[in-house]
């Protein structure tokens, strides 16, 4: 996809749409894929702390290392970035965010470019693995990656060590430092469709608990059984000693061709019952919508579908996050993306089919 490179930097306004880090990550990924330099201004202008934070800087530096890019403006707090990519190459990366910033967002930045370039990559990312402002490890590993596998991707993601946001300074204490490992082999993405809902074939509720009393997990799972009707056999408590202090409730459902995972994050001052109730409400809303693709998965499928040359999926009405992502993709790629009403849902069709 890099033939006939356009070397004129693409001007990108980071304040567009939802005005957050997704514009940065998608722009970095597509710059690497297409070979098009970018000049991005107003980075994360829509956030309380605008500019590059540590986790966003880690995305920039990971992309730079992956393709040997020339970069200007890669500092914490910077609202302007110039990124001129080289070709994506095979290799091993080690990325340390230096805070509990999200490792999964770094993975999202480099995963699809490495697949598109048909490269072999092993990337080890240190930081937070479970962060309330980003998809947790389990979402990428058990919801997003299975769909990439269906598209032909050869990729694995392993959780080497938990790292919880708010779990302490990972700079000072190795126990609070999470780690993910991404492995990719050369592969070819092909179009798929995810339009049928299907019956729920399996469901699980898991509480991951670190350095907190067991009764916290028991209270959360009691709410799950009460509100969603999960059985005791479908509930699990996983107590760990790494990653600082953490409480995460994972609600997962599987269908024949689709899956979803909802996360509830415990926080100081919030009762366990409220954490669980919020997560249950979110999963109940998803089930009531009778769609195979959830809000966050819809956002993440857009780029690989566009690079595969097409495909369709059915979801609830797209978030502003996703519509901003569509706009960003279409700045780089001449790939039609149509969003059409489909009852109370939406049908997203990518490509010229």
Image: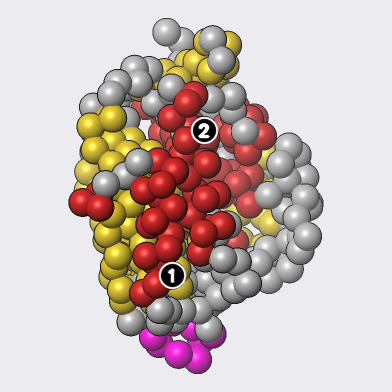
Other-residue count near label 1 (Cα within 10 Å), few / some / many at <14 / 14–19 / ≥20? some
Q: Nearer the viewer, residue 15 or 272?
A: 272
In the rendered structure, the answer to whether residue 46 lies left or right of residue 75 reads right
- Give the residue at x 53% y 25%: 316
Q: Nearer the viewer, mark 1 or mark 2?
A: 1
Regarding residue 328, the answer to whether it shows in the image is no
Q: Nearer the viewer, residue 314 or 150?
A: 314
Q: Quadrant of residue 318?
A: top right
Q: Nearer the viewer, residue 140 or 79?
A: 140
Residue interval drawn in magenta: 169-177
Q: Nearer the viewer, residue 224 or 353?
A: 224
Q: Position of residue 160 (x, y in %)?
A: 28, 70
Disc 2 is placed on an element classified as: helix
User: What kind of colouring is applied to the model shown?
Assistant: secondary structure
From what the image shows, is residue 46 above or below residue 346?
A: below
- Give the residue at x 26% y 47%: 231
- Residue lying at the far bottom of the rendered structure: 172
Regarding residue 323, the answer to whether it shows in the image is yes
Disc 1 is placed on an element classified as: helix
Residue labelled with disc 1: 216
Q: How many marks?
A: 2
Magenta segment's dominant SS is: loop
């Amino acid at each position: 996809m890099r033939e006939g490179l356009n070397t004129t930097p693409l001007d990108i306004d980071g304040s567009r749409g939802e005005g957050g880090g997704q514009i940065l990550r998608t722009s970095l990924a597509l710059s690497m894929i297409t070979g098009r330099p970018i000049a991005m201004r107003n980075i994360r202008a829509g956030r309380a702390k605008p500019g590059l934070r540590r986790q966003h800087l880690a995305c920039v530096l990971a992309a730079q290392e992956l393709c040997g890019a020339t970069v200007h403006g890669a500092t914490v707090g910077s609202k302007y970035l110039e990124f001129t990519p080289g070709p994506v190459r095979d290799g091993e990366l080690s990325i340390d965010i230096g805070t509990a910033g999200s490792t999964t967002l770094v993975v999202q930045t480099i995963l699809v470019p490495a697949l598109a370039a048909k490269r072999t990559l092993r990337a080890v990312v240190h930081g937070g693995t479970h962060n309330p402002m980003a998809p947790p490890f389990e979402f990428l590993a058990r919801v997003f990656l299975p769909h990439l596998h269906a598209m032909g991707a050869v990729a694995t993601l392993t959780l080497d060590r938990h790292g919880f946001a708010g779990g302490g300074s990972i700079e000072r204490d190795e126990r609070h430092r999470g780690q993910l490992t991404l492995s990719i082999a050369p592969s070819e993405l092909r179009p798929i469709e995810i339009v049928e809902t299907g019956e729920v074939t399996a469901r699980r509720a898991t509480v991951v608990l670190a350095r907190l009393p067991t009764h916290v997990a028991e209270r959360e799972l009691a709410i799950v059984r009460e509100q969603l009707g999960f059985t005791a056999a479908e509930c699990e408590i996983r107590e760990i000693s790494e990653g600082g202090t953490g409480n995460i409730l994972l609600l997962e459902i599987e269908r024949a061709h689709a899956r979803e995972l909802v996360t509830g994050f415990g926080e100081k001052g919030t009762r366990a019952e409220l954490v669980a109730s919020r997560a249950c409400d979110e999963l109940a809303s998803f089930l009531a919508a009778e769609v195979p693709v959830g809000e966050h998965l819809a956002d993440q499928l857009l780029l690989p579908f566009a690079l595969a040359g097409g495909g369709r999926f059915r979801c609830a009405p797209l978030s502003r996050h996703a519509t901003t992502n569509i706009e960003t993709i279409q700045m780089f790629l001449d790939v039609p993306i149509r969003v059409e009403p489909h009852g109370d849902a939406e049908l997203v069709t990518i490509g010229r089919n």
